[in-house]
Amino acid sequence: MTAKDTRTADDLLNAVGPAFAKLRRTNLLEVENPISAKDLSRTLVLNIVAENSHGPGAEVTVGKVAELLGTDPSVASRMVSDNIKAGYLVRAASQQDGRRTVLELSSDGLALMDRFRRHQRDAFDYITADWSERDRLDFARLMLQYVESLDGLKDRGLAKDA
């Protein structure tokens, strides 16, 4: 809290949720590496596929996308189909069960994710341009710690999949 900030601890903690809701708006800033609103929504699915396709036996299906998005399978199916039509995802046969179809990022999907990450970094740099370097790095460390704690909920048995 800065000297000018008179919010109570409860006020600050209650403001966190609405602040998180605003974070995706940063992707609409007019900075380098622009991302269209349509591609921005596509990155929700692409991130899930990218983050969950590593390790032994790690395969992502439409059902897994639905589960991790917390949405109905029919909604996830439409989102996946849109990514396939856009050329960002491809369907492949499962290496574990040939009857199953899994999702993989295409080269265009990998390129979009690279562009998206560059855009996020540019937006972060733009938004925090008048922050001290220490504040910028502290915020980055704390945000990463928060996300790692979210991922750790699975290990503590408090969440199915974070």
Image (tube, rainbow, N blue to C red):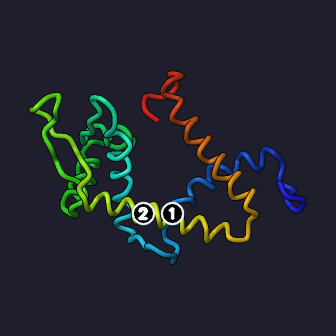
Tell me the kind of residue under disc 1: Gln
Q: Residues within 10 Å of mark 2 (few under 14, many from 20)?
A: many
The residue wearing badge 1 is 120
Vertical side of 138 occupied by 149: above or below: above
* Residue at x 90%, y 59% (from the top left corner): 3
The spot of residue 122 in percent (x, y) is 54, 68
Label 2, on which residue? 116
**Horizontal and vertical percent position of residue 46:** 33, 52
Q: Based on the displayed image, in which of its 4 quarters is residue 98 positioned?
A: top left
- Residue lying at 54% horizontally and 22% vertically, measured from the top left: 156
**Residue 160, position as x, y percentages in the image:** 43, 28
Callout 2, which amino acid?
Phe
Residue 113: percent from the left, percent from the top?
37, 59
* Residue plotted at (87% across, 56% down): 6
Q: Is residue 148 above or below residue 108?
A: above
- Give the vertical position of 146 relative to 121 (above or below): above
Which element carries disc 1, helix, strand or loop? helix
